[in-house]
Amino acid sequence: MYSAESYFWGWMAYSFGVLCLFAVYWLLVRKISPKWLKHIVVICFLVLFFTPVTAYPDNPYLAPAFFVSLYEGVMLKNQGMGFQRGLAPILAMGSISIVLYGLLSPFLARRKK
């Protein structure tokens, strides 16, 4: 079994990789003209790759929900909850993030002016 330090360094390497992928992703979405749409697309990308969930049901360590969902949905089709264990937190965090963005964006736009 891995130690807490191993999971920490794994998250560091994973975060660095996702941020490198995000740099390329940003080059693709930066020219979307409505700013609100561009922001929502960026929020969805970050939520998809950075939402954590427990790696195993009886393990306290966290793993990216996207990969947990993918693994359990593809490899463990008939056992347990499948895609749902990783997909539910992603949908919840995505919904919360978009609602918070919708509530905070008018205040931030007003502050900017």
Image (cartoon, rainbow, N blue to C red):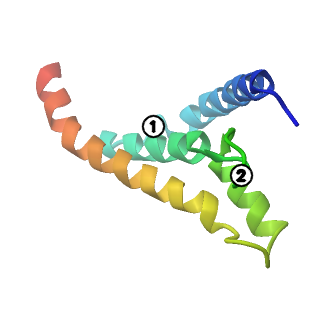
Pointer 2 local density, CA inside 10 Å: few below 14, some 14–19, many at least 20: few
Q: Position of residue 22 (x, y in %)?
A: 60, 32
Secondary structure of the residue carrying tag 1 is: loop
Q: Residue at x 70, y 70 (%)?
A: 82
Q: Position of residue 111 (x, y in %)?
A: 13, 21
Q: Which mark is residue 31?
A: 1
- Taking 99 as reference, is 78 left or right? right
Instruction: Say what secondary structure mark 2 lies in.
Output: loop
Task: List the residue tagged with mark 2.
Answer: 58
Looking at the rendering, in which quadrant would you find the C terminus?
A: top left
| In this picture, residue 11 sits left or right of residue 25 | right
**Three-letter amino acid code at disc 1?**
Lys
Residue 83 location (% of width, % of height)? 66, 67
Distance from Cα at disc 2 to Cα at disc 1: 44 Å
Foreground residue among 78 and 17: 78
Q: The disc labelled 2 sits on which kind of residue?
A: Asp
Q: Give me the residue at 22% from left, 36% from top.
A: 105
Q: Position of residue 78 (x, y in %)?
A: 79, 79
When asked about the image quadrant of residue 4, the answer is: top right
Q: Nearer the viewer, residue 50 or 108?
A: 50
Sequence order check: which comes first, mark 2 or mark 1? 1
Q: How many marks?
A: 2
